[in-house]
Amino acid sequence: MTKILTDTDWQELKAESEQNGQAYTQSKGVETIHQVKILDVFNTYQCWTELRGGLSILINEVEFIDDLVWIRDSFDDYRFGLSFFLSGKVRIERHGLTDEADESIGRYYSECNCDIKETEWWKAGEKYSRIYLEIEPQEFFSNFSEEDLEQIPIFLRQALIGGKVQPYYHQGKITRQMRRVLREILQCPHQGLMKRMYLESKAVELITLHFQQFQKQDIHNHSLTAKNLSDIDKIYQAEEILLGNLENPPSLMELARQVGLNDFKLKRGFRQVFGTSAFKYLHDYRLEKASQLLALGEMNVEEVAFKVGFDSRSYFALAFRKKFGLNPNQYFQHRQKSV
């Protein structure tokens, strides 16, 4: 029999399990262990370790008693993560972002699941396990240079420049190198501080391998003909083209042609994925990028305006003041005083 579970149901069942002594939390060295048993629903085990600032690792196992449809709508934070599947399979739809997709052994995904409702379909008797890395971009990348940050995926760069964070999902294949690192995480030979340092090094290695795979996939996607890309891939490709050509972006018709969509589909799809029009998105990104460049203090206002694609300094000043409440010179002076 298939059960249907909402987030409200989950909170009530969890509270009931805690009252009945079927849920507990235990701190063990650098780890925090959560175990929850909900009768006739599932058993779950989680081992959570905070590594360095902005980086945590979660080892999660869950087994369902009956088939379950879980309707989740409480993702109201901006969580970035990498999830590596070790066993089991679940089907998930991220409403407004993806169609139904299988997440299963041998695959991993990167995500930002802010304000996205999910429906999950779980099968009874199947043991599901994964290793999840949670990243807080502002903290994790705080010591990276601007040149370094240009090499990380665009959805993370958006979070770093202070713009509106957009939902994101990308699925990849667990490589042989990733499997080795995942195995080493599960077989960690250390305890205490040494375990924390060891897990941190392995987590950073997984992130590095993901970035390498993402870059290779990005190059591959750009070499594909447009007809081989899904519509949502084409929307993200359009975003990359816009942000990669701040000084001289293509027209809407040209952008649609480059990604293989008609202009109506591009306009509608861009608004569905990013919540605004393509060129409003570009406009806001330019201003966020300008504020970042002004804060660095390496270019004057005119140079910054040109760098982010504004031909008119007066229009740039007007738009900047409308967004930030200060004109660019005032913003520059204010940031220099606070440094």
Image (cartoon, grey):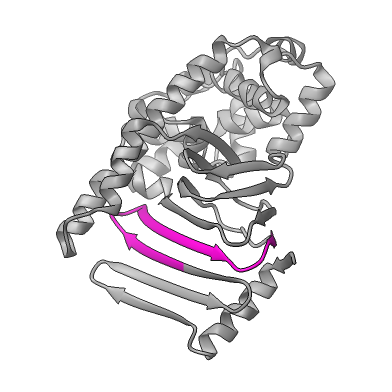
Q: Please name the residue shown 39% across and 23% down the image.
A: 299
Give the mark count: 0
Q: In which image quadrant can residue 240 be found?
A: top right
Whether residue 336 is visible, yes or no, is yes
Q: Quadrant of the N terminus?
A: bottom right
Q: Please name the residue shown 47% across and 38% down the image.
A: 106
Which x, y percent locates residue 134? 42, 52
Instruction: Note whether 210 is above or below 76 in the view shown.
Output: above
Which x, y percent locates residue 150? 41, 26
- Residue found farthest to the right: 264
Q: In which image quadrant can residue 175 be found?
A: top left
Instruction: Note whether 225 is above or below 89 in the view shown.
Output: above
66 part of magenta stretch:
yes
Which x, y percent locates residue 37? 52, 77
Judge left or right: residue 331 versus residue 102. Answer: left
Give the overall secondary structure of the magenta segment. Answer: strand
Q: Please name the residue shown 73% across and 67% down the image.
A: 3
Whether residue 297 is visible, yes or no, is no
Q: Quadrant of the C terminus?
A: top left
24 part of magenta stretch:
no
Of residue 83 and residue 283, the one placed in the foreground of this image is 83
- Looking at the rendering, the stretch of residues picked out in magenta corresponds to 45-72
Which x, y percent locates residue 147? 34, 25
Judge left or right: residue 5 versus residue 131. Answer: right
Judge left or right: residue 166 versus residue 8. Answer: left
Instruction: Note whether 136 is above or below 303 in the view shown.
Output: below
Q: Please name the residue shown 64% across and 62% down the image.
A: 74
